[in-house]
Every structure is written in structure tokens, then in C-alpha cells.
Image (cartoon, rainbow, N blue to C red):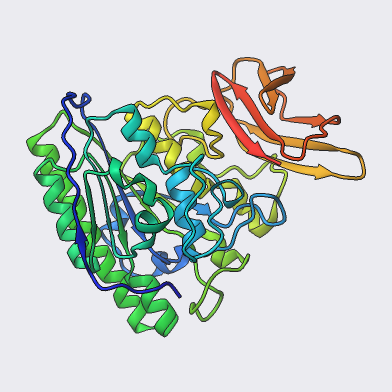
């Protein structure tokens, strides 16, 4: 159960002399605790307008990326593009995330200072606790109930005051904790869908008035719900790990699609063949035209545009004294594949290779980068 707070509003305005970019805009809609399977069975006509794929939360069970299927770790991964072994948010407790792995808002402001960034949330914790050090980069920071935050965001989009926005809605998670899968939970999902409709309408109105603007709308959730009852979450079950990513675009790359062959881990009915929560932040960067830097050590890949390898996974074999890296060749790779370990080139492979055995690592932390087509895919072991 997440802590509840009374609605309040804090607004911060920062002026910039820079001109805005050519018109790339982002709306990230987070609906807390909305289980993918429930969304499939409850009427959601507004969400149905988007292009959806399953995705997974909680990292890969049994590896260094495993994290609880709780709100804190889930939102931190969605906002940063890394798992809890990097961002260090392991629960809903009042952690401050590792500053080496800031949210996409911070990196966006660094890259395009003139963009107006907004975080409007039902749950206070993401930008008032985890990423509180990033508050000065936000043009608008506000809290409120689901209807309030939706109205605020819709007005700011129509008026052109929010170029990049994260909105957090909470009703499905609150109803799930209180009532489990129930009529109350169904109603919360239906009401959330109506609010999504208001946000999509605001974007549509803005695009009519400013047709040069190119909007990426993404809808995500932080975790699923426990099997059968739907009251809780936090464990490594299929139902709690299964989430979703919805977008308003149709031209997605193959990383957005299900991959059922060549996976190092085939647990949870092949769930790891779908995208992960870590892919959201890189997708936002790609849409905004912000080059993803290798030193950011992101563990997701963009779901639009050019790709390198995808579904990179690893296993450390203490008996053999090495690390196996395995990935899926996206069929778009037409260059040699370079493997770097902690910044040093350790191997160059042919473009059709899909694994690498590293028999010599002795460092306590191993950051691997697999580069193809000029695109880096990373993992920490």
C-alpha cells in the first residue's frame, strides 16, 4: 500500500532565452497498478485507440536486475531506463534515487533547455522524494486527485505550456488494495480510461492548432496485481510482472514486438520476449531526438527508430568463472558487433552472432555494452 497525501500544488516557473525545438512533444501517462489482463476484459474505449504491447516489470527474476513489483521500483525504472541495482529504489520507502541515474526529465532539460517539463501526480513520491534533486529542472510540479491532475495537464497541453509531461493516475491501484478485483476496481479502470480520453482529446486539439508538433503519447503502469484476488503486489509472479506499454504511434520497431526465440530466459510463458519497463525512457529520448549516451548506462532500448541488438540478457557462472551474454539479433544489424566490458573493448563479432562468453572478468561490477549499428545495448552483471 502506498502512502496517501492530501492534494497540494507546487508550481515552479523557470524562464529560458532559448528557442524551442522543431516540435517534438511527449505525454507519458502512468496508471498505477492496472493489470494488463484486467485492461483486456474491462471496456476501455480510449485506451483501445492506442497501440499496445505486453511488457514486463520486476526485472529478470534470479538475476541482478530483479526488483520488487512495487510502485517505487516500477516508477523509478520507467522514469530512468535502469533497474533498481542502478537507481537504488527498492521499495516505496522514502529513498532518494542514485543521482548517477536521473529521470528522463533531467536529461531532457540538459539536452533541450527550452522545453517546458511538467510532473503532475496523484502519488507524491516520484518527484518529491526519489528525484527531488531534479525539481529545479521542472517548469511545473503539482499534486492532486486523478481528476484534478488530468484537468491540469489537459489545460497545459492545449495552452502550449507543457512540452514534456509525466502524469500519474492512481485509482486502479487504490481500488485494488481496498477491494481486490471487484466492481469498485472495474469502476476505477473505467474512470481512468475516461481521463485518458480527456488527455488524448487535449493532444488532438493541440495538434489541430499546431500541426507541426509531433506528439508521442505513452501509457504505462508500474506493476500488475497478485493472482486471483488482485489485492496486493510485489512478488515475482506472472500476473504481477506482466505490464504494458501503449503508444499513439504505429511505426514501431521490432523491439516493440514479441520475440519468442533465442531468449536466454524463457520463464513466465515467454514474458521476457516482450519489451520491459526500462525501454520507456530510451523511447522518449529517441522521439525527442536526444542522442543516448553510453555513459548513461541505460538498460532499455528505444522502441522507435534504428536498433542494435535486443533482449540482451546475462548469466554469471561461478563454477566456470565467466559470464554468458545472449541477445536477439533484431534482423536490422548489418555491422560488426562490439562487446565492451567496463569501457574496454573485449571482442568484435560478426553481425549474425547472438552470444558471447566472457571467461576472464574479475571485477566486482561488470558493465557490458553490446554495440551494433552505432546503437548501444547495456547490462550490468
Q: Nearer the viewer, residue 67 or 192?
A: 67
Point 87% across, 45% down: residue: 318
Is residue 120 found left or right of 345 in the rendered image? left
Q: Is residue 313 visible?
A: yes
Q: Is residue 286 above or below residue 63?
A: above
Q: Nearer the viewer, residue 142 or 338?
A: 142
Q: Nearer the viewer, residue 190 or 152?
A: 152
Point 89% across, 38% down: residue: 321
Question: Residue 255's spot in the image, x, y percent?
Answer: 52, 37
Q: Is residue 120 above or below residue 162?
A: below
Q: Is residue 251 visible?
A: no
Q: Is residue 252 above or below residue 352?
A: below
Is residue 64 found left or right of 147 in the rendered image? right
> Dividing the picture into quarters, in which one does residue 170 lie?
bottom left
Is residue 325 found left or right of 374 in the rendered image? right
Is residue 112 found left or right of 40 in the rendered image? left
Point 42% across, 58% down: residue: 221
Identify the image quadrant of the N terminus: bottom left
Question: Residue 5's spot in the image, x, y percent?
Answer: 31, 72
Identify the image quadrant of the C terminus: top right
Q: Residue furthest right?
A: 319
Question: Residue 365's spot in the image, x, y percent?
Answer: 72, 39
- The number of discs equals 0
Q: Is residue 339 above or below residue 134?
A: above
Point 76% across, 40% down: residue: 364
Question: Residue 227's spot in the image, x, y percent?
Answer: 56, 75
> Dividing the picture into quarters, in which one does residue 239 lie?
bottom right
> Dividing the picture into quarters, in which one does residue 336 lie?
top right
Amino acid at each position: 500500500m502506498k502512502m496517501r497525501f492530501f492534494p497540494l500544488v507546487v508550481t515552479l516557473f523557470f524562464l529560458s532565452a532559448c528557442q524551442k525545438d522543431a516540435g517534438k512533444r511527449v505525454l507519458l501517462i502512468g496508471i498505477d497498478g492496472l493489470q494488463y489482463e484486467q485492461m483486456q476484459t474491462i471496456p476501455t474505449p480510449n485506451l483501445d485507440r492506442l497501440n499496445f504491447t505486453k511488457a514486463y516489470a520486476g526485472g529478470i527474476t534470479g538475476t541482478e536486475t530483479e526488483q520488487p513489483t512495487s510502485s517505487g521500483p516500477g516508477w523509478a525504472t520507467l522514469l530512468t531506463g535502469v533497474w533498481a541495482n542502478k537507481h537504488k529504489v527498492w521499495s516505496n520507502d522514502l529513498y532518494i534515487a542514485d543521482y548517477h541515474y536521473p529521470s528522463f526529465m533531467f536529461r531532457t532539460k540538459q539536452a533541450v533547455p527550452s522545453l517546458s517539463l511538467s510532473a503532475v501526480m496523484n502519488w507524491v513520491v516520484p518527484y518529491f522524494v526519489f528525484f527531488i534533486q531534479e525539481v529545479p529542472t521542472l517548469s511545473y510540479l503539482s499534486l492532486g486527485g486523478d481528476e484534478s491532475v488530468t484537468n491540469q495537464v489537459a489545460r497545459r497541453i492545449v495552452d502550449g505550456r507543457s512540452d514534456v509531461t509525466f502524469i500519474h493516475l492512481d485509482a486502479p491501484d487504490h481500488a485494488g488494495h481496498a477491494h481486490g478485483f471487484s466492481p469498485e476496481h472495474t469502476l476505477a479502470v473505467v474512470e481512468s480510461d475516461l481521463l485518458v480520453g480527456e488527455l488524448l482529446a487535449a493532444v488532438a486539439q493541440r495538434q489541430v492548432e499546431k500541426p507541426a508538433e509531433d506528439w508521442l503519447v505513452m501509457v504505462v503502469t508500474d506493476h500488475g496485481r497478485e493472482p486471483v484476488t488482485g489485492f496486493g503486489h510485489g512478488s515475482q509472479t506472472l500476473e504481477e510482472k506482466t505490464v504494458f506499454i501503449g503508444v499513439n504511434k504505429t511505426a514501431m520497431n521490432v523491439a516493440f514486438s514479441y520475440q519468442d526465440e533465442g531468449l536466454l530466459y524463457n520463464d513466465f510463458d515467454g514474458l521476457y520476449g516482450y519489451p520491459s519497463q526500462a525501454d520507456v525512457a530510451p523511447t522518449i529520448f529517441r522521439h525527442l531526438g536526444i542522442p543516448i549516451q553510453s555513459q548513461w548506462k541505460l538498460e532499455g532500448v528505444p522502441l522507435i527508430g534504428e536498433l542494435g541488438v535486443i533482449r540482451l540478457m546475462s548469466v554469471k557462472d561461478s563454477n566456470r568463472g565467466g559470464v554468458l551474454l545472449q541477445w536477439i539479433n533484431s534482423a536490422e544489424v548489418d555491422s560488426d558487433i562490439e562487446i565492451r566490458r567496463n569501457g574496454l573493448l573485449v571482442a568484435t563479432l560478426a553481425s549474425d552472432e547472438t552470444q558471447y562468453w566472457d571467461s576472464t572478468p574479475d571485477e566486482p561490477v561488470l558493465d557490458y555494452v553490446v554495440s551494433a549499428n552505432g546503437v548501444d545495448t547495456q547490462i550490468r552483471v
